[in-house]
Amino acid sequence: MNTRAIFAIIRKDLKVVSQNKGVMLPTLIAPLFLFVILPWSVVLLPSIFKFMGLSADDLGAVQSLIARMPAGLQQGLAGYTGIQLVIVYILVYMLAPFFLLIPLMVSAVIAADSFAGEKERKTMEALLYTPTTDRELFIAKLLSGWLAALVVAFAGFVLYVITVNAAAWSQIQQIFFPNTMWLVMIFWVVPALPGLGLGVVVIVSSRAEGFQDANQISGVLALPILLLVVGQVSGAMFFSISLVLLLGLVIWLLDGLLIWLGSRSFRRGRLLGA
């Protein structure tokens, strides 16, 4: 395998991505909102309640919702009361599925640019003449998005840990995040998610006319994550360690299937005529 050529393509792709505002803006704005702005907004709930003439402990609707949740979730929230209960519920459990959107989104955006963007920049022919086989070119494109997504996700997680504990310190008075469920999610599920996005979008991107076409199609990938959000809010399920382990296993199996199918169907000769 021509690893030198593979890493040359990866470096080139990452350099192009870093200079592309259409790719970089959504990649940076979404994590900034989720990891910084949202945690501080949640912790400001007491001030918002006070401004509205309500008590910070007047959270009956939210507490009633939590009371209907599975026993495992209530056990995870044991020891918290009033506004503490709401803060921990939102920051630890409610936002967990939203966090999964970040590596999926980053990998999908970069993958959408991997071939469709090459067509728009008129660099496709030069790419096709690189000294790589079809499989090596496919692997290089996969690794470009995978590495970028992991860097953003892990950096975002560190930022989220710092922000959540700092923002909630005035209410919680202790470091409460991350818990075991989050650690399993970060090191088991998050590394698998870019493969799910890349396995689909690289194939779609190779046939799309432009970056916007491929990127719009990739938005469908967010639907399963949004279903997890709905399930969490409705109380039908909650992000427990067992659920996270099962979710990661399913995603890794899908990764293997999609990458196998993609590598078998990928042919560089089709790209110019796509």
Image: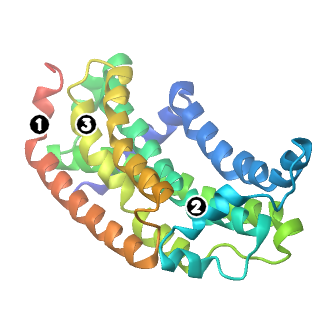
Residue at label 3? 130
x and y percent of residue 10 in the render? 40, 46
At a point 54% along the width and 56% down the height, the residue shown is 153
x and y percent of residue 191 in the render? 41, 63
CA separation, marks 2 and 3?
Answer: 57 Å
At a point 26% along the width and 65% down the height, the residue shown is 250
At a point 39% along the width and 43% down the height, the residue shown is 222
Q: Amino acid at mark 2?
A: Leu
- Residue 157 shows in the view: yes
* Circle 2 residues within 10 Å: few <14, some 14–19, many ≥20: few
Look at the image and tell me in which quarter the N terminus lies.
bottom left
Look at the image and tell me in which quarter the C terminus lies.
top left
Going from the N terminus, do you reach mark 2 or mark 3 first?
2
CA separation, marks 1 and 3?
Answer: 14 Å
> Which secondary structure, mark 1?
loop
Q: Are marks 1 and 3 in contact (CB under 8 Å)?
A: no
Q: Amino acid at mark 3?
A: Thr
Compared to residue 11, the image places residue 120 above or below, namely above
Going from the N terminus, do you reach mark 2 or mark 1 first?
2
- Residue 7 shows in the view: no
Residue at label 1? 267
